[in-house]
Image (cartoon, grey):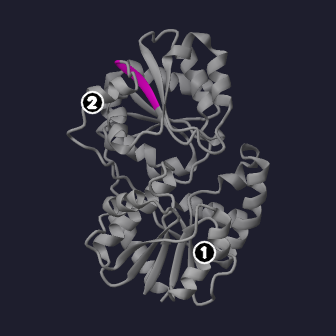
Amino acid sequence: MKIAIDIRNIGKGRTGDEVVFFELVRHLALYDDKNTYHLLIDTRIPENLAHVINRLGIVQKKNFIVVQIGSGNKFTWNLWSVPQYCKREKIDIYHTQYIIPFFMPRTVKVVTHIHDVSFRVHKEMIKKTDAFFLNLLIPHAIKKSHCVIAVSQFTKDEIIKYYHCANEKVHVIYNAVSMHCDSHTDEMSVREKYTLPGRYIMALGTMQPRKNIPFLIEAFAEIAQEKKDLLLVLVGKRSHNFDRAIDNAIARYPHIQNRIILTGYAPDVEKCVLYKNAEIFVFPSLYEGFGIPILEARSMGTCVVASDIPSHREIADRGVFFFDPRSLDQCKKMLYDVLDNDKIKSDILTMTHENRFSWGISAQKLMRLYQSLE
């Protein structure tokens, strides 16, 4: 078959969704020598193209080609560039995420990846213009797709609940973790780059309202009065839909303003150092489809304190400390308990952790899904 995959987000520092498509494509290249893959991008910068090919490990793979089509305009991409390309090249399957082209040739089977439906559950946390387009385009994508991929059982249940999608149409293909660390990375230089202290709590994410970062800042502001040597490191860039309440929360507590470090986007090799040296990794989200950072932190031997929400319980019921993401007292107590008790941390890190999550397994499941559409 000829399979086209939208990989526009790879290399753009989009964290979660970028990681998912990067790892799935990278592992498809390891296992599939039969189908031909057209990896679609919208950039025309040669060095970016070479970088993508090298990172995916497809230099020697003749059945994997990176194709530049259209431009950076996402509307013309979906309305014109992709449908025309799929028609011209006689593509059998087109795999994208969330939003699909309106005028795709009928011969093309469309697969849509849905990472979460937070925009439907927490409408108050996104811009009205975003809500308008998502309410218009997501139902169309789910209805017109031949199958929908959910990253967890929780996300599958949410898709069915909010969009009345048939159970058999939604397939769960789990995310996984594969930190790309470099043993030659100079940890001291990373510490100096981000002015990291000896002790710090770390959080990582896209800094959107559902990530609940102002709540964490408030909890830190209270424990910081006793933990004088402790800092809070927030990893993530000011992306689209940045939560302005983060700046307000920092401004509200003058005594911690010089004890909060915002690193911006951090590449994997630096992220490894950040995880490994953190006292605790905190993931306080109000809503997630999966929660890759929880698995990343655990893989680096870092103690995880996370919000008690369904998706987190699904992927890490053991080996993680949970708290109610709306209870400040519970969060503070959890942080105090873990910071002050090395035995608690060592005990939970030695707990058995189910090896259910593998990009190799997920890529093979994706291959079987493609095959079922033939």
Pick whichever, 316 or 280, lies toward us.
280
Question: On the rendered image, what quadrant is the N terminus found in?
Answer: bottom left
Query: What x and y, as percent, mark residue 367?
Result: 40, 77
Residue 187 numbered mark, or none: 2
Queried whether the magenta region covers residue 200, the answer comes back as yes
Say if 297 sits above or below 357 in the image: above
Say if 249 sits above or below 145 in the image: above
Q: Amino acid at mark 2?
A: Glu
Query: What x and y, as percent, mark residue 30?
Result: 28, 70
The answer for how far apart the CA atoms under marks 2 and 1 are is 44 Å
Say if 16 sits above or below 239 in the image: below
Query: Of discs 2 and 1, which sits in the foreground?
Result: 1
Q: Which residues are magenta?
A: 198-202
Q: Secondary structure at mark 1?
A: helix
Pick whichever, 228 or 257, lies toward us.
257
Q: Earlier in the sequence, mark 2 or mark 1?
A: 1
Queried whether the magenta region covers residue 238, the answer comes back as no
Residue under the point 65% across and 76% down = 80
125 left or right, relative to 55: right
Q: What residue is shown with label 1?
A: 81
Q: Amino acid at mark 1?
A: Ser
Say if 128 sits above or below 324 in the image: below
Q: Is residue 166 visible?
A: no
Q: Secondary structure at mark 2?
A: helix
Pick whichever, 22 or 340, lies toward us.
22
